[in-house]
Image (spheres, grey):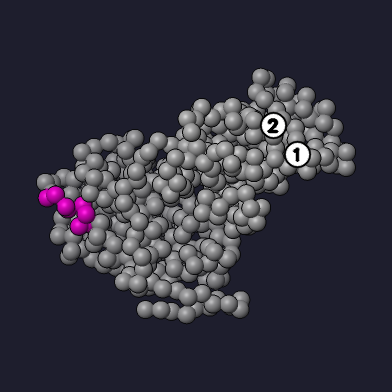
């Protein structure tokens, strides 16, 4: 795996990911996740929906850096991700992390592809920036899929004081479904953006909207 | 589509994720029109960071274009405190969620705070000063130099007069150490002579200000220190 993918997947990467819980704060508030036992189901369904979508678009963006793409391609890819993200709160969270990742990426890995992307989309979605920075479709998909579950897993440790060894093991046991998700993402990486898969989780969409609505009146520790 | 949806404690929130009903995403380019000077205010829980922020807004609000980013977990409470104090227009206050890690948000990954500062700079071109107030943390918390140009560390006499002696990066490296609530020192058995001499011993030449916002609500000594940092303005 390329070093860039490892750095971006590291929780110490300064791209703003640590303030996002991937919907698990809302699930914790509603007592849908209360212990280590509840985590595998939450994380697996997140991996197969939001995680698969992120992996798909990360791989597609990485693939686009390896071939000639027409002017406007980045904007189209970004719009297709928008179209697959019905929750305004999730679009905002994705763009916030995309902006943070781009801020760090401009310093660490400047490239013509990154300049083209930011020229067309100044605040692109997170998986698209990630894909451009990594540049290898399967590695980009792995980083995106891993972040889709490692973020909520670490948020669960902070919110519930869970046993970090148990939580780490839960994430490790997602290896096989994560490989499947990433293999599929890499398979379709070169397809027309409009035809890319559109996995979705209405539950996570609702959590994200409810979380954003409640920021105004109750304490929320995470931005999403 | 609209979904009414409750969660068991007596009130309801309207959830709306119809993409055609939401406002457009705000993802236009950030205009760069020079940037404001940024001062970080850190320190333990309850030491008086928000009160000092309010005092600085009172002292400097008339002479400077000012805005505040607050990181407290009770973000709306802090924002409310500043609003009720009437020291700053509410739209000049941005709240940031730190994912239960206040020191990470000011030191290791400053993304959320930088975003908030840049939102304020977009809304108010020509800002002179942005105050970034950290969530309450421990004695090791410091602001990254990528976020704050200068930083103030706030401790108080009620936290114990041994705090400056304990050191830690907050006490030893902050550009200014403020010892707050000197008016209650005699009530909590804190020896101000010990506190200030320990502070000076730990900090070498770096400045220390002991103050009481009860005696001097506008924090004149700290405000003067802030003024000394800012470039001379031509307004």
Q: Could you tell which of marks 2 and 1 lies nearer the N-terminus?
A: 1
Check the image and report above or below for B63 versus A43.
Answer: above
Regarding residue A23, the answer to whether it shows in the image is yes
Regarding residue A135, the answer to whether it shows in the image is no
Q: Position of residue A122 (x, y in %)?
A: 29, 48
Q: Position of residue A168 (x, y in %)?
A: 48, 53
Instruction: Give the label on residue B216, or none.
Output: 1
Instruction: Give the label on residue B226, or none.
Output: none
* Label 2 crowd (10 A; few <14 / some 14-19 / many >=20): some
What's the distance in space between the residues labelled 2 and 1, CA to CA? Answer: 9 Å
Q: Which residue in the rendered view is the most extreme toward the top?
A: B205
Mark 1 element type: loop
- Residue denoted by label 2: B221
Q: Position of residue B140 (x, y in %)?
A: 62, 36
- Residue range corresponding to the magenta coloring: A70-77
Task: Locate residue B18: give its quadrant.
Answer: bottom left
Q: How many marks?
A: 2
Task: Locate residue B210: give its quadrant.
Answer: top right
- Magenta region includes residue A4: no
Q: Going by the image, does B39 lie left or right of A4?
A: right
Residue shown at 29%/41% (left/top)? A2
Callout 2 touching callout 1 (CB < 8 Å): yes
- Taking depth in this image into account, of B93 and A41 the one nearest to the observer is B93
Check the image and report above or below for A97 versus B193.
Answer: below
């Amino acid at each position: 795996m390329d070093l860039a993918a490892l750095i971006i997947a590291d929780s110490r990467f300064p791209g703003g990911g640590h303030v996002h819980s991937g919907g698990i704060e809302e699930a914790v508030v509603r007592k849908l996740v209360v212990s280590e036992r509840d985590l595998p189901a939450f994380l697996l369904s997140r991996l197969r929906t939001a995680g698969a979508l992120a992996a798909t678009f990360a791989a597609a963006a990485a693939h686009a850096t390896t071939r000639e793409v027409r002017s406007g391609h980045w904007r189209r890819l970004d719009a297709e991700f928008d179209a697959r993200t019905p929750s305004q709160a999730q679009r905002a969270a994705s763009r916030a992390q995309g902006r943070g990742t781009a801020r760090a990426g401009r310093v660490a890995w400047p490239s013509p592809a990154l300049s083209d992307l930011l020229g067309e989309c100044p605040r692109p979605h997170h998986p698209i920036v990630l894909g451009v920075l990594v540049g290898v479709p399967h590695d980009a998909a792995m980083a995106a899929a891993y972040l889709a579950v490692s973020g909520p897993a670490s948020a669960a440790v902070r919110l519930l004081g869970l046993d970090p060894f148990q939580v780490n093991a839960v994430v490790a046991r997602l290896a096989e479904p994560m490989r499947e998700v990433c293999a599929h993402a890499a398979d379709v990486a070169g397809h027309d953006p409009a035809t890319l898969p559109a996995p979705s989780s209405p539950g996570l969409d609702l959590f994200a909207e409810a979380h954003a609505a409640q920021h105004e009146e109750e304490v929320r520790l995470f931005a999403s | 589509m609209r979904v009414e949806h409750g969660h068991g404690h007596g009130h309801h929130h309207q959830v709306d994720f119809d993409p055609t009903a939401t406002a457009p995403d705000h993802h236009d380019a950030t205009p760069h029109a020079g940037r404001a000077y940024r001062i970080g205010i850190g320190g333990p829980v309850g030491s008086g960071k928000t009160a000092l922020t309010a005092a600085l807004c009172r002292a400097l609000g008339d002479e400077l274009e000012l805005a505040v980013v607050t990181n407290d977990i009770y973000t709306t409470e802090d924002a409310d405190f500043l609003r009720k104090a009437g020291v700053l227009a509410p739209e000049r206050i941005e709240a940031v969620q730190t994912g239960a890690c206040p020191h990470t948000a000011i030191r290791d990954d400053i993304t959320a705070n930088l975003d908030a500062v840049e939102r304020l700079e977009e809304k108010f071109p020509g800002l002179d000063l942005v105050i970034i107030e950290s969530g309450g943390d421990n004695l090791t918390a410091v602001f990254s130099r990528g976020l704050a140009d200068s930083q103030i560390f706030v401790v108080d006499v009620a936290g114990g007069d041994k705090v400056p002696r304990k050191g830690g990066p907050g006490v030893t490296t902050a550009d200014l150490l403020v010892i707050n609530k000197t008016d209650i020192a005699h009530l909590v058995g804190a020896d101000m002579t010990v506190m200030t001499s320990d502070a000076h011993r730990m900090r070498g030449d770096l400045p220390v200000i002991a103050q009481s916002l009860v005696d001097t609500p506008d924090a004149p000594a700290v405000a003067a220190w802030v003024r000394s940092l800012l470039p001379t303005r031509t307004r």
